[in-house]
Amino acid sequence: MPFSIKHFSVSAVALATSLLIGCGSSGSSAEKDVTPPDDQTTIQNIIYLQAGPNLTEDAKTALISATDNTRIVFPAGHHKISDTLTFDGDSDGDGIQVKNITIAGAGMNKTSLDFSESVGSDGLLVQNATNITIEDIGFEEAANNAVKLRSTKGIIIRRARAEWKGELTKDNGAYGFYPVESEDILIEDTYTRGSADAGVYIGQSRNTVVRRNVVQENVAGIEIENTANADVYDNIVTGNTGGVLVFDLPIGNEQYGGKTRIFNNRIYNNNTDNFANVSDYPAGVHIVPPGTGVIVLSAKNVEIFDNYINGHDSTSIAITDFQIAASREEMQSYVDNGVIASGFGPTPRKVYIHDNLITDSGKNPRGDLIVTPKAVFNLIGVTDFPPILYDGLGEMLANQGRSEQFGEPPFAIDGSDNVCATRNNNLEGEPVINGRLYDPQSKSYILVDGQVLPSPSTNTDLLSCELPSIEPTIITINGVAYGCGADDVDSVMCPAVDTTPPDDTTNPDQPDEPQDQASCQLSGEGVNWQALAKSDCPDLSDYRLFENSANPTENANGGEPFELAIPLFTDYATKYRFLFMPSGEQATFQPDETFDFPVGSVLVKTFSLPADTSQRGFEHEQLIETRLLIHRESGWTALPYLWNEGGGSAKLAVAGKSLAKSVVHKGETFDFTYVVPDKNQCKACHQLIPQEGRSKFSPIGPKARNLNFDITINGQTKNQLIHWKDNNLLQGLPDIASITQLPKFNDDITNSEIINMETDQLTAMAKGYLDINCAHCHRSEGDAGNTPLKLPYWLSYDDNKSKHGVCTKPVTYGGGALSFLTIPGDAENSIVHFRMVATSPKDRMPKLGRSLAHTEGVQLIENWINRLPEVNCQ
């Protein structure tokens, strides 16, 4: 069927007209009617936020306190936001999610949230949510991602804007709208501009509809990565480096894509020079050649049809194998580290390209990946790059039996695995040229300088075959079906389909019981256990945890002070830790993970900042915050309390706070912003998300290896774990000699002391430091579980080098122009080291919990990496 403009959505054209004229300028543009559509859940609670200096704090409070069916409305105007705004559907960790939340403004060009001065890396972060709507609002200048959603089911982003204004630069944020590891996603009628990675990115997710969006001047316009069941249609994609990308990448988390339809889009003039951060990761977005309309990389079961694809310097549609970018050695590394076994395969299969209108293509091909193919085609007299280009490499290697170790058997004899291109015409109705670099039927290949020698060919009938069409993706959110053929019905493009949702036999969550604040006012002696069990009290003193409520550093009411061998770094603050457990209760020993603490347990940590780290102690310090981790019947919950400027009392600060502070350390003065995390940010660090199941809140510090050392108690020296056992605080403790013992590390250590350590001691200290500071995210169940870096202490370096980042390339932006996470013998060029030194919200790791670089921690990891046996990473 020839392409027909009449099928293109009128609303998309109207949206484009207003956005391409109005966005990114001081002028106004016509706004859409922001009346909530009929399909919205009945709103039971509306929170109207007010403009002013407290907007960030008020917004955080609203996001934390929201109950089911709440609509949070930002006012019209341009507003500076000072930190990441976080919504966690299960912020109290009880496994019961708050559902049906709407975050809205007065219009995408009328309400602008400006994150250019934010201390956080993201604009809006949503996690562990069910049915979230973001509409009629703009997000600007986020350091990393404008809107990120993780582990969320039911996402609607409509009439929203994500924008980096001004120059297109690698310093812009990475993603505009960024749902990852989520399900049932609708992104419609939005505008994105200026992303240094992708404007609209869907990653490791299921069931997605992306429609009627305007995606302009990003590196990648729309990217569907490792995502199953996606419909991308009625979009205007222009001015990007590459228009629409469908990628399957070797992430290793068993989440790979399939069943993607790209149809009825206007994809034109995507010729912007690539401004992404450069690295050596073979499939990073920095490899996208300028002037590319659609790229399919490694993905399987993709249909591209009825699109208008015009004006691309390099090629209109490219179908390519991961092995084009990755060497055989790199491919073998994916075998060795289990990525191939997790389901990744480098070769695209079942790609059906048909009935597209393709014009003005291949006049000025450029980009590193284009250099060799361009030269090869020139050798056979082809000057203009083919509008449809299939590399054919993976198919050839698979048919020769050379890719089975990479999970790629020979292509099916019946043609069902083929890449097919048919009925793709230019404006004159003539079929466009198809090009292929390698002949899939070749029985052998020739190596030249380690590279497979191409055998190029071009012909209008080269890829002539047909495949069955892919079924539409229909998503259901709150009982309403969305998608082509559901709420969007066109007699030709989107015929009506059955949208009856499957029976939901799951038991609905029961809402949280309202808290009884009266327990906070109970008088008496000792700890207020009743309030701890049920109430988020407004004053820390309501819990009666300390004999002197103004001094949380000593004399706890039955609480056990404890220390860690290697503590988490927080801007050189002193930390005072206490464990409270109900009478007669004990923690249960765990060899690797945090101990199992009984319901009723409370972990208390007070942060106090000295004027000079050479003089610590209560009398030399300013109290900043006290954090409580309370194990309630419903699970763990986190409560941050902020001390007033002069001390004396601490108030509940669920919205957190940013404070201008100064500290002298080893003679050097540091001025910085100390960030008290909000309640949802506490959850972000402390949560573990199993591959199947809800997030689990977990303490980080109190593990056997980090408690196994001698302390002084009442003038006597005793092992801390044995002390816990002898005082009936811990059960199940094995022979102390069988428990790993970390060497102690603190801020007083000198670089010369680190340099003179024995290698075994240095390794144990370095791994312990990475474990406490990084591994809560960098583990399979952590927030960074979809990255290759895994740092739990129990993973031995010798047996898991790639998981420690050795010669491993990041799957997304890693750091500057650096290529590998860890280069043994070369800390200076290792991304892990770069992230530790960095202090900008975009680059630093960990991204929460510090503003300063930890000089001693950097020196420790630097010395460890430099002492590792050298490896030639290529």
Image: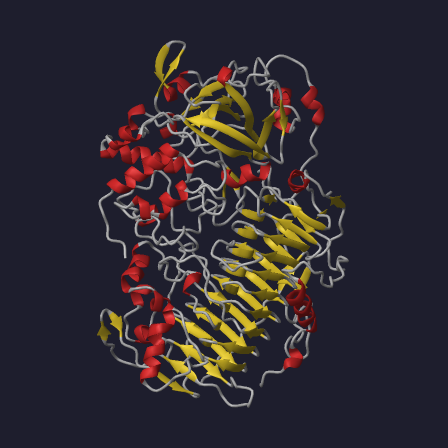
Q: Residue at x 38, y 73 (%)?
A: 370
Q: Quadrant of residue 569?
A: top left
Q: Is residue 820 left or right of residue 54?
A: left
**Residue at 31% in and 58% down:** 335
Q: Position of residue 179 (x, y in %)?
A: 55, 55
Vertical arrangement, residue 622 with respect to residue 112, above or below: above
Judging from the image, the colouring scheme is: secondary structure
- Asked whether the viewer can see residue 515, the reply is yes
The foreground one among 592 and 575 is: 575
The x and y percentages for residue 163 are 59, 57
Give the side of residue 328 with respect to residue 127, left or right: left
The image shows residue 167, relative to residue 452, as above or below, that is: above
Instruction: Name the residue: 57% across, 78% down.
Output: 308
Q: Where residue 116 sits: x, y (%)? A: 57, 48
In this rendered view, identify the residue nearer to me: 870 or 94.
870
Label count reads 0
Q: Is residue 581 left or right of residue 764?
A: right
Is residue 500 visible from the viewing direction of this image?
no
What is the x, y in percent for residue 276?
Answer: 45, 59
Q: Residue furthest top?
A: 715
Quadrant, the C terminus: bottom left
- Residue at image location 63% in from the left, 55% down from the top: 504
| Quadrant in the picture for the N terminus | bottom right
Q: Is residue 125 above or below residue 204?
A: above
